[in-house]
Image (cartoon, grey):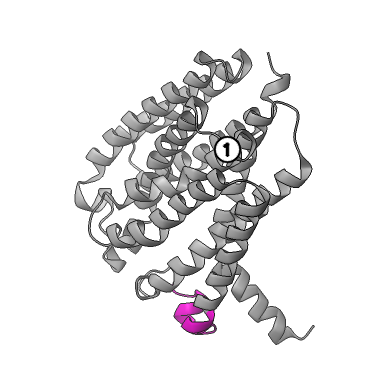
């Protein structure tokens, strides 16, 4: 394969924001195996993973197209393909549409209509609602968290084909987790958001208000995560591990009120949030064999 062909394939691949795809697939897999209770269907599992991944990829490409003007102003994103025009806007839209159709076909015909509907809700909130509100208000982060909370619900509903208390808790857990996670990002990438004119909470309300809200969301996360055990969807090993991790995350965040190096502190909060979500998904996946 010629170097030029490799570069264009890589450009299209990066246009899908693979990091977002992989991280969301992890939580979806956790939701799937929580519902499967040790009895999984390989075909159903693969259809769910690929259907979800294609849908997320489609949403990300559309988002890249919509945000290309903002991306041009941010150091982190100014080298993206649509900003550099190594991929045309028309080709990006075609690519996004093909990915979206593939997602729809897989979820509707090989998973179930409920999973396809939940995926569509997440797609709509990310491509439409988040794209609108991220430019207008600090509540854009909350709006965006709705789409980010969809994957474990898709995984869970792929097996159960109904929306129950566990599905609701999975959704809430991911919403509550995302808020401090993304607030931490908005703190250590503060200058980028200022350059792009994106009104994230640290810019609109200040660092102190952001830190306070992070604490409340973390407490809500710890409670919601524990409720999976209260309602008998997970065991006590899961409860102990998630509670300990949640408390450690809370303690790290509380140190933000006295730190002199805000960026370093925000990165610690961010990286610990990644450890928490990976552990959460793993514990869900093996919940059947845990006491």
Q: Nearer the viewer, residue 38 or 193?
A: 38
Relative height, residue 193 to residue 12 (above, below):
above
Relative height, residue 147 to residue 74 (above, below):
above
Picture coordinates of residue 176, whole percent (x, y):
40, 35
Relative height, residue 118 to residue 72 (above, below):
above
Q: Quadrant of residue 161?
A: top right
68 relative position to 150: left or right: left
Task: Please name the residue that numbered disc 1 is placed on.
Answer: 157
Picture coordinates of residue 134, whole percent (x, y):
30, 58
The residue located at (57%, 74%) in the rendering is 95
Q: Quadrant of residue 253?
A: top left
Q: Nearer the viewer, residue 74 or 4?
A: 4
Q: Nearer the viewer, residue 106 or 2?
A: 106
Please provide the residue range marked out in magenta: 78-91
In the picture, the quarter occupied by the N terminus is bottom right
Disc 1 secondary structure class: helix
Picture coordinates of residue 196, whole percent (x, y):
31, 67
């Amino acid at each position: 394969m010629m170097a030029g062909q490799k570069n264009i394939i890589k450009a299209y691949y990066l246009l899908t924001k693979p990091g977002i795809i992989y991280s969301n697939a992890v939580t979806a897999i956790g939701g799937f195996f929580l519902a499967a209770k040790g009895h999984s269907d390989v075909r159903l599992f693969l259809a769910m993973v690929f259907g979800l991944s294609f849908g997320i990829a489609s949403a990300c490409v559309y988002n890249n197209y919509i945000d290309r003007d903002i991306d041009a102003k941010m150091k982190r994103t100014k080298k993206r393909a649509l900003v550099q025009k190594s991929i045309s806007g028309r080709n990006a839209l075609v690519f996004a549409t093909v990915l979206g159709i593939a997602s729809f076909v897989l979820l509707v015909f090989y998973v179930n209509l409920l999973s396809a509907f939940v995926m569509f809700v997440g797609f709509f909130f990310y491509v439409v609602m988040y794209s609108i509100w991220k430019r207008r208000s600090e509540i854009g982060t909350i709006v965006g968290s709705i789409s980010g909370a969809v994957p474990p619900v898709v995984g869970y509903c792929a097996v159960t084909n109904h929306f129950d208390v566990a599905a609701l808790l999975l959704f809430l857990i991911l919403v509550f987790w995302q808020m401090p996670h993304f607030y931490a990002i908005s703190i250590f990438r503060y200058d980028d958001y200022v350059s792009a004119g994106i009104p994230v909470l640290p810019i609109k309300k200040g660092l102190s208000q952001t830190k306070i809200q992070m604490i409340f969301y973390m407490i809500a996360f710890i409670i919601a995560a524990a409720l999976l055990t209260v309602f008998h969807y997970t065991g006590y090993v899961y409860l102990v591990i998630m509670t300990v991790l949640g408390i450690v995350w809370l303690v790290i965040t509380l140190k933000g009120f006295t730190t002199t190096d805000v960026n370093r502190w925000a990165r610690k909060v961010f990286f610990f949030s990644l450890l928490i979500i990976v552990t959460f998904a793993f514990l869900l996946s093996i919940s059947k064999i845990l006491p």
